[in-house]
Image (cartoon, helix red, strand yellow):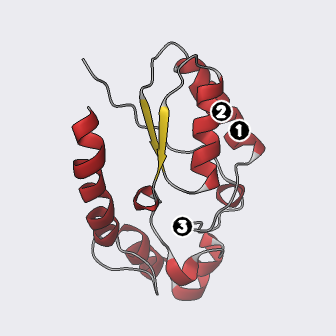
Amino acid sequence: MSKLICVRHGQSLWNKENKFTGWVDVDLSDQGISEAETAGELLKNFKFDIVFTSILKRAINTADIILSRNESKPEIIRDKALNERHYGELQGLNKAEIGEKVGAEQLHIWRRSYDIAPPEGESLKDTQERVIPYYENEILPMI
């Protein structure tokens, strides 16, 4: 029986600084590296045939660290369709400072509403419309 294991990348440098990251290619923090190592230990006895990851180095490095603790030599597929949500003009800005500038309510709308995107960014609906077809067409047939 096939299994699908989903892992989010470890803490990034900008996660640590409370910044919107989105599609900016920020690496893992020391904590993120440690989180990936822990995930690798937890998953070391699984056999991986295929690994899908975004094209962002925090995701790629998380996958590499996990696989470094594993004897599997899976095919690795990277695709920008798996990138996290694009935060547009908010990328690189501190979340708390943006909340102070535009108000907590507007920040909440940009972050949590389904179909309202931050300026020049993606809504959750937009992200879903990008990721779900990739999952259905590329990942699901492999399971």
| x then y, percent, for residue 92 | 66, 74
Quick one: 99 or 79, which is closer to the camera?
A: 79
The answer to the question of whether label 1 and label 2 lie on touching residues, with beta carbons closer than 8 A, is: yes
- SS of the residue under disc 2: helix
| x then y, percent, for residue 41 | 60, 19
Q: Earlier in the sequence, mark 3 or mark 1?
A: 3
Please say if 76 is above or below 5: below
Please say if 89 is above or below 7: below
Q: Earlier in the sequence, mark 3 or mark 2?
A: 3
Q: Residues within 10 Å of mark 2 (few under 14, many from 20)?
A: many
| x then y, percent, for residue 112 | 37, 67
Given the current orientation, which residue lies at the most extreme top position?
45
The answer to the question of whether label 3 and label 1 lie on touching residues, with beta carbons closer than 8 A, is: no
Q: Which residue is mark 3?
A: 22
Q: Amino acid at mark 3?
A: Gly
**Residue in the image at 31% along x and 72% along y:** 126
Q: Residues within 10 Å of mark 3 (few under 14, many from 20)?
A: many
Please say if 17 is above or below 97: above
Give the number of the mark in front: 3 or 2: 2
Q: CA distance from mark 3 to mark 2?
A: 21 Å
Q: Residues within 10 Å of mark 1 (few under 14, many from 20)?
A: many
Q: Which residue is mark 1?
A: 33
Q: Amino acid at mark 1?
A: Ile
Mark linked to residue 65: 2
**Residue in the image at 38% along x and 76% along y:** 109
